[in-house]
Image (cartoon, grey):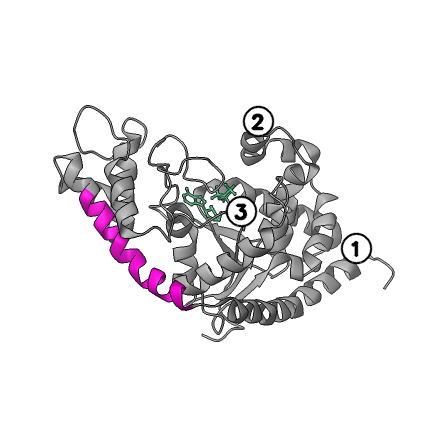
Amino acid sequence: MNEATRPRAFSGIQPSGALHLGNYLGAIRNWVRMQATTDGVYCIVDLHALSVPQPPGTIRQATIDLAADLLAIGIDPEESILFVQSQVPEHTELAWHLQCVAAFGELRRMTQFKDKSERADFVSAGLFTYPTLQAADIALYDTDVVPVGDDQRQHVEFTRDIVTRFNNRFGDVLVVPEHRIPTAGDRIMDLQAPESKMSKSTDSPQGIVYLTDPPADIEKKLKRAVTDNDAEVAFDPTGKPGVSNLLTILAVATDSDPDTVAKGYSQYGPLKTDAAEALIEMLRPFQERRAELDEPTTIELLHAGADKARERATVVMDRVRAAVNLLA
Ligand code: AQP
């Protein structure tokens, strides 16, 4: 299939901290796999990261580090476009148009906004309108599929709603996308608090497996993972969230499913040891490639990616301006 006939995929990730297992198993692994069948556009969404206060000077370095991580994981700049959101100004322009068709009430219902705003001392207007910028990111590339983890399901559905509303007002201008959420690994939980998702911005150093963690740290974190007292290995995410998380991790790392994996264990100890081993093996090639990537090469690839992204974004933005009937 050539670029013109393959479905278009788009997804983004914030440079808001080091990559963890949830980001990889829930989303990025799919990005890499889908490169064979889709025309992929992958974006480091640095403007999204600004929606919560960041320590001064951290975003630039975090952006470069994240790009190197994505290249080492297998995002191939020959196959896909990898770029930084702030280098393509059309994202914020389209976001404004979408904000003007989004309703205040539907933004207020977004669970990510509710969760993050409840935990924050300062709630920015940007955090509130975040889903409209995300909708613009997606719509700007005529996206057909959006590979994301389950936590982004509501935002992609919101994108479908406002893109459809925009089209109803202004004509058939934007493509209505669909999400692509994995059947297992769509929500990896914190090892120390398995009722919460593993997240870059929570303070849980022992609960998060970072992709750059050395093998000894992975073993230690898995060994200390919270389980329960009844010592029965079964996949039951509501009743046994800790054990189910370990089963999911081992299943996804070995391309199996959690119920099948559960049948092979009667104790938590061997399950933890095998899950750690599978993760160490899964991450080894990434960790080796990551050590070889230097900053100047990474920055150069990002600039080239931004040029390619901008070429596509200007075409869609021209369509939007014409449809809204602004003075050319
Ligand atoms: N725990 C998770 N399990 C499965 N998928 C996950 N994703 C994130 N956490 C998990 C998926 O990773 C992609 C990139 O996420 P993001 O950085 O853009 O934002 P996020 O969803 O808010 O991720 P974090 O790690 O929780 O970041 P912070 O703490 O900065 O908000 C998305 O596709 C997401 O579904």
**What stretch of residues is rendered in magenta?**
273-292
Which residue appears at 31% of the width and 52% of the height?
A: 214
Residue type beneath disc 3 = Ser
Left or right of 283? Residue 96 is right
Left or right of 316? Residue 66 is left
Which residue appears at 55% of the width and 28% of the height?
A: 119
Mark nearest the camera among 2 and 3 is 3
Q: Secondary structure at mark 1?
A: helix
Q: Secondary structure at mark 3?
A: loop
Residue 69 in which image quadrant: bottom left
Residue 314 position within the rendered picture, expressed as x and y whole percent measured from the top left? 70, 66
Query: How many residues crowd mark 2 within 10 Å: few (<14), some (14–19), many (20+)?
Result: few
Residue 52 in which image quadrant: top right
- Most common SS among magenta residues: helix
Query: How many residues crowd mark 1 within 10 Å: few (<14), some (14–19), many (20+)?
Result: some
Pointer 3 residue Cβ closer than 8 Å to ligand 1: yes
Q: Which mark is residue 118?
A: 2
Residue type beneath disc 2 = Glu
Query: To which residue does mark 3 refer?
Result: 16
Of residue 29 and residue 198, the one placed in the foreground of this image is: 198
- Up the image or down, 168 lies above or below 292; here it is above
Q: Is residue 5 magenta?
A: no
Of residue 124 and residue 247, the one placed in the foreground of this image is: 124
Query: To which residue does mark 1 refer?
Result: 324
